[in-house]
Amino acid sequence: MSSCNTSIPQPLVFVLAGTPGLESSYSWFSVPFFLVFVITVIGNTAILCIIRVEKSLHEPMFLLLAMLSVVDLSLVSVTVPRMLGIFWMNAEEISFNACLTQMFFIPSFYVMESGILLAMAFDRFVAIWHPLRYTTILANNMLVKMALAVLARAVALLTPAPILAKRLESFRTHIIAYSYCAYMAVVQIACGDISGHIVYGLMVIVASVGFDLLFIILSYGLILHAVFQIPSCEARGKALSTCGCHLCVIALFYSPVVFSVLAQILGYRMAPYLQIIIDNLYFLVPPMVNPLIYGARTKQMREWVLRIFHCHGD
């Protein structure tokens, strides 16, 4: 429950405070953010181009990786430019409608990425448990259905966010202590009863990240059980290497949100700027690291990268 002694009506423009408490360090902050953006765009674009050109990569695992790269590019495109605008040009103002748009798309892409990671875990499960039926189970029509399910869930879960936020009539302030329009950040500056909004926010987390993480853990438990029963040491090592690659990506993606949720449950109060930095890690680190990990672990992609550098060297 939130109450207001003085309130303002629904503003036409919000002010994004960026990272309160670290304003003097914005020039330094902008450098890693810009580098992350450039590396992410180059890495994921390279992944998409290589998968498109290399026919041997037209198989379920790499098609799912291509989906992941598309979502990663979309995620950084709707977050980093706005952050850099705040750091470089003090472009802190955002219209109410633009705020609602960000409120839908940013978490939607995050939920989509979580769903694709679950699909990739299922891909590895089928490859280990049903290798002879792998291409039959994960045929192109199944991949299309999985992609549509990931998209539909994100749209269904996040469509209420801007609708509910639009119904908020009065606010304590028009300043949002974030570098983007997060749903809960807007709700927390609203006046009146916000308990329903909090319940909705928790429901989104449980129905997306909580659901996906539970089934990813279950899938990899079964995968590791099957891997350690493989008699050949070489085959076992190859399977563990592939699974290790996926587990690194999963750990990088889920660790910030798990840490944030656990901190709130345990009552640990972080400094506001630290909470905002951790929240930004949701959207910045995985899109940058994913192509680096998968590119380094895939022979065909390594060969393509070496070929490109060799051509430029000549």
Image (cartoon, grey):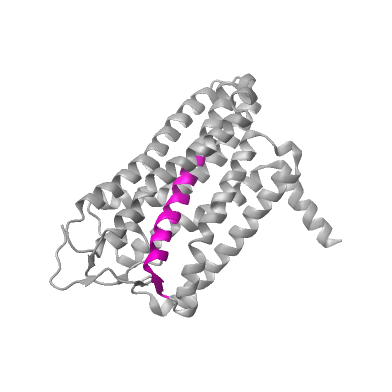
User: Quadrant where the C terminus lies?
Assistant: bottom right
Figure check: 131 above or below 12:
above
Q: Residue at x 62, y 45 (%)?
A: 66
Q: Foreground residue, 196 or 264? A: 196
The percent position of residue 154, horizontal first and vertical second, equals 43, 45
Q: Which corner quadrant of the image does residue 20 belong to? A: bottom left
- Number of numbered labels in the structure image: 0
Residue 227 on the magenta span:
no
Q: Is residue 266 visible?
A: no
Q: Residue at x 48, y 45 (%)?
A: 112
Q: Is residue 307 visible?
A: yes
The percent position of residue 88, horizontal first and vertical second, equals 49, 78
Q: Foreground residue, 147 or 65? A: 147
Figure check: 190 above or below 59:
below
User: Quadrant where the N terminus lies?
Assistant: bottom left
Figure check: 174 above or below 158:
below
Tell me which secondary structure the magenta stretch mostly adopts.
helix
Q: Which corner quadrant of the image does residue 4 belong to? A: bottom left
**In-image side of 51 versus 269 (left or right):** right
The percent position of residue 250, horizontal first and vertical second, equals 48, 43
Q: Residue at x 57, y 30 (%)?
A: 142
The percent position of residue 286, horizontal first and vertical second, equals 51, 52
Residue 109 on the magenta span:
yes
Q: Which residues are magenta?
A: 92-116
Q: Which corner quadrant of the image does residue 246 belong to? A: top right
